[in-house]
Image (cartoon, rainbow, N blue to C red):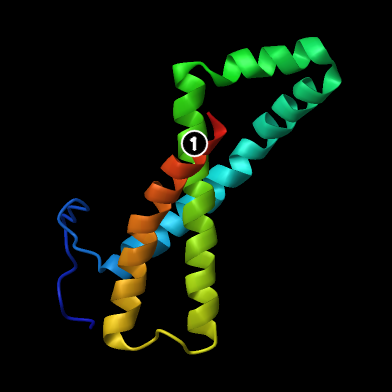
Amino acid sequence: MPGEPRPVFLNLLQIRLPVAGVMSIAHRAAGVLLFLALPFAIALLALALSDQEGFAQVQVLSQQPLMQGGLLLLLWALAHHFLAGIRYLLIDIHLGVQAPWYRQTAWAVLAAAPVLALLLLWGLS
């Protein structure tokens, strides 16, 4: 509206997004993280496939705590992006669009992705 004053101070920490909004932002962040991790993943794969020494180097490197944390973060991003993508595909065919369902599926994605990431990391160890 033309006569209304615009907000001067907007505190982003006080904005309460709905759970579907949080899940949507996390989906985008996960996609960016996966994209940015591609060169590192390709470099590690190339090193592992180069020879036995390179494979041993990647094995030792993968046991480092920093690398384990990074791997957990990437596994979360992969799980979240996958699950949220399925949720969005279902929404595209008009399943789960109603009020209680879109919140419940958003909570399900936010809860299941870290659990799935931990299970995958445990399976890789």
Above or below for 75 versus 59: below
| Residue at the image point whose x is 77% and y is 20% from the top | 47
Residue 15, given in percent of the width and then of the height, sits at 19, 60
Q: Quadrant of residue 36?
A: top right
Above or below for 29 versus 106: above
| Residue at the image point whose x is 35% and y is 68% from the top | 106
Q: Secondary structure at mark 1?
A: helix
| Residue at the image point whose x is 17% and y is 63% from the top | 7
Front one among 32 and 122:
122
Q: Residues within 10 Å of mark 1 (few under 14, many from 20)?
A: some
Q: In the image, 11: left or right of 93?
A: left
Q: Residue furthest right?
A: 51
| Residue at the image point whose x is 36% and y is 72% from the top | 105
Count of all numbered marks drawn on residues in the image: 1
Which quadrant is the N terminus positioned in? bottom left
Above or below for 72 versus 16: above
Q: Quadrant of residue 107?
A: bottom left
Q: Which residue bears the numbered disc 1?
A: 121
Residue 4, given in percent of the width and then of the height, sits at 15, 77
| Kind of residue indicated by mark 1 | Leu
Residue 108, given in percent of the width and then of the height, sits at 35, 65
Q: In the image, 5: left or right of 112?
A: left
Q: In the image, 56: left or right of 82?
A: right
Q: Residue furthest top?
A: 53
Residue 16, given in percent of the width and then of the height, sits at 19, 63
